[in-house]
Image (cartoon, rainbow, N blue to C red):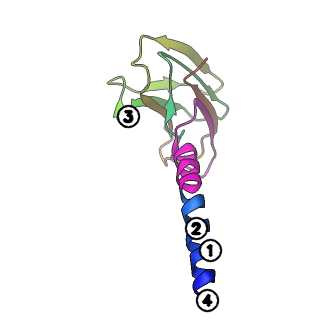
Amino acid sequence: MKKFFATLLTVTALLSPTAFSNQEALAAAPYKDSVTLTTGLPSISTVRVKNNGVLAYNVVNTGFQKVSFQIFDNGEPLFSERTYLDPGKRDATSLGGVSPNREYSLRIYCESSTGKGCTAGASLNGNP
């Protein structure tokens, strides 16, 4: 019985650093993400993405209602105003000069009177 516990303790000790390093790798922010706003959602956000000093986004309004979007820098709005897109419109831009090695996200909002009924897609790339 003592040999069993000694072996279990050894195996646990050997696997623990690997388990923690894998968790850190999984928790690290990716360099890009994309989302789709569907008719039942009032808004949706990308995960936070890392960047290398250049940030590119692409937002397409595929529905019949106006949508807006906002980019966030570590959870704080990057710009004071949302950008609005009419139905069928697209906004795609690269933003240079953003702080490198920070995390950014993009949130799309449905601008219909009910907060629903919009469709749109967005991608955010921190390593274009």
State the CA–CA distance, disc 4 to disc 3. Answer: 51 Å
The tag on residue 74 is 3
Please name the residue that numbered disc 2 is placed on: 10
> Looking at this view, is 89 or 126 the one in front?
126
* Pointer 4 or 3: first along the chain: 4
* Apparent side of residue 101 relative to residue 76 in the rendered image (left or right): right
Question: For numbered disc 4, what is the local secondary structure?
Answer: loop
Question: For numbered disc 2, what is the local secondary structure?
Answer: helix
State the CA–CA distance, disc 2 to disc 3. Answer: 40 Å
State the CA–CA distance, disc 2 to disc 1. Answer: 5 Å
Please name the residue that numbered disc 1 is placed on: 7
- Percent across and percent down for residue 66 are 54, 32
For disc 1, the neighbor class at 10 Å (few under 14, some 14 to 19, many from 20) is: few
State the CA–CA distance, disc 4 to disc 1. Answer: 10 Å
* Pointer 1 or 3: first along the chain: 1
Q: Which is in the foreground here, disc 4 or disc 3?
A: 4
Magenta residues?
17-43
- Percent across and percent down for residue 123 are 61, 29
Q: Are marks 4 and 1 in contact (CB under 8 Å)?
A: no
Q: Are marks 2 and 1 in contact (CB under 8 Å)?
A: yes
Please name the residue that numbered disc 4 is placed on: 1
> Looking at this view, is 25 or 54 the one in front?
25
* Pointer 2 or 3: first along the chain: 2
